[in-house]
Image: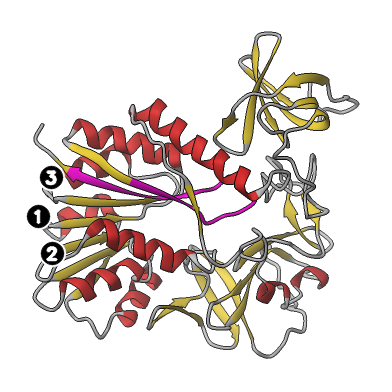
Amino acid sequence: MTDDEPGGTAMAIELTVGPVAHGGWCVARHDGRVVFVRHALPGERVMAEVTEETSRFLRADAVEVLEASADRVTPPCPFAGPGRCGGCDWQHASLDAQRRLKADVVAEQLKRLAGIDWKGVVEEVPGASDGLGWRTRVQFAVDRDGTVGLRRHRSHDIEPVDACLIAHPEVENVGAEVMNWRNASSVEVIASGTGDQAVVVAPKPRRTVAVPDLDTSVAVFVAEGKGRTRVVHGRNHLVERVGERDFQVTGSGFWQVHPGAAATLLDAVLEFARPQPGEWALDLYCGVGLFAAGLAEAVGPEGAVFGVESEPVAVRDAERNLRDLPWARFARGRVEDALDRFGIERADLVVVDPPRAGLGREVVDRLTTLRATRIVYVSCDPATLARDLARFAELGYRLADLRAFDAFPMTHHVECAALLVSEPI
């Protein structure tokens, strides 16, 4: 029984909390069954309300702390906690503890899924020393009355909010949370590192959204599905800057949400990849060309970089962003198909930055045929990363190094960069 059942009352159980698990949970046991419990920390004793029950495990929220961990803090956000906003997982833990927990998750996933022992740390990303005010892209849900909020954990229910503490100040300055967005299904607010601001409104089917009055400097786009947006006001793109290079990002195209993440990850990729003049490099899932730019500058005009991206708008942005580096070329397509379609048989080095689902067996198998001496794998999910590393190992690529970054403070998410090198089987 769960508290979502008509007339149901959530079952309360006392738990001694064990280790952290992937996804913002800790693991406990009750009557021989595993319990995945949120809002708790390892070593605590808590009273928890069961939110979901299966034949194999329970899910629960810690609603009362009987014995607290030394790592516990008061959540800074009034909307955090059991049954409230699901955007943050670890507001009740100190920042140092959050990073230790994330390191434990990375290590556990690597060991369990790939047999790899890793004893690294999760590094701070510059730009959010207190773990707040970092998220430069926030997608708000909208209820039937036009009120903005954020989804509750594992729910379609909306928690109304008047401010989000992990949102960047320039996102908050737009004021979307205190406006009415009737007939919208979602409202995404974006603030770039160069000061650009935009709002992307997704209307409900067959409805028209009356966009509230916004500052004239805020661009307004309407989402039309499949990644397409229509400009209502302002220009159709934002500009991000890393080092001395500007990157155009059209509409709601992908860019790292932490203001320090793009530069941090680019540095890590180049440190691992060690691109040399004259080398032939691939940048797969290349987005608007962040990693391709660093690779192209390093390999020089006597080398070449080939980027593959499935989103056509991102490909156009990448071509524009690297127009001064003509030895960098880009193509639209799924990585599974593009390497064969373009006859790519060899590369000196490969950089991959796939979505959360990871590469998968088909892509891993194909990449190993390129005989690259270095593969740099950027991942936002340690589970799919570990799964893919296990397959790489079967095909002769071993993990030489791995760095993890706290690009999403207060949440369970962690960004990793892994270096794979070839070795004889």
Q: In the rendered structure, does residue 128 fall within the stretch colored magenta?
A: no
Instruction: Please say whether residue 150 is visible from this viewpoint.
Output: yes
Crowding around mark 1 (Cα neighbors within 10 Å: few <14, some 14 to 19, many 20+) is some
Residue reaching furthest to the front:
70
User: Residue 43 appears in which quarter of the rendering?
Assistant: top right
Outermost residue, right side: 7
**Residue 160 screen position, x and y as percent:** 82, 57
- In the image, taking residue 362 as reference, residue 9 lies left or right, namely right
Identify which amino acid the numbered label 3 is placed on. Answer: Thr
Identify the magenta region: 402-421
CA separation in Å, label 3 and label 1? 8 Å
Give the Cα separation between the discs numbered 2 and 1.
Answer: 8 Å
Q: Left or right: where does residue 103 sit relative to residue 69? A: left
The reply, left or right, for residue 87 in relation to residue 159 is left
Going by the numbered disc 1, the residue's amino acid type is Arg
Amino acid under disc 2: Trp
Residue 81: x and y, percent?
Answer: 79, 43
Q: Which mark is residue 369?
A: 3
Q: How would you rate the neighbour count of disc 2 (Cα within 10 Å): few for under 14, some for 14-19, many for 20 or more?
A: many
* Front-most of residues 121 and 84: 121
The relative height of residue 401 versus residue 277 in the rendered view (above or below) is above
Q: CA distance from mark 2 to mark 3?
A: 15 Å
Residue placed under numbered mark 2 in the picture = 280
Identify the disc placed on residue 346.
1
Q: How many marks?
A: 3
Q: Quadrant of residue 89?
A: top right
The mark nearer the N terminus, 2 or 1, is 2
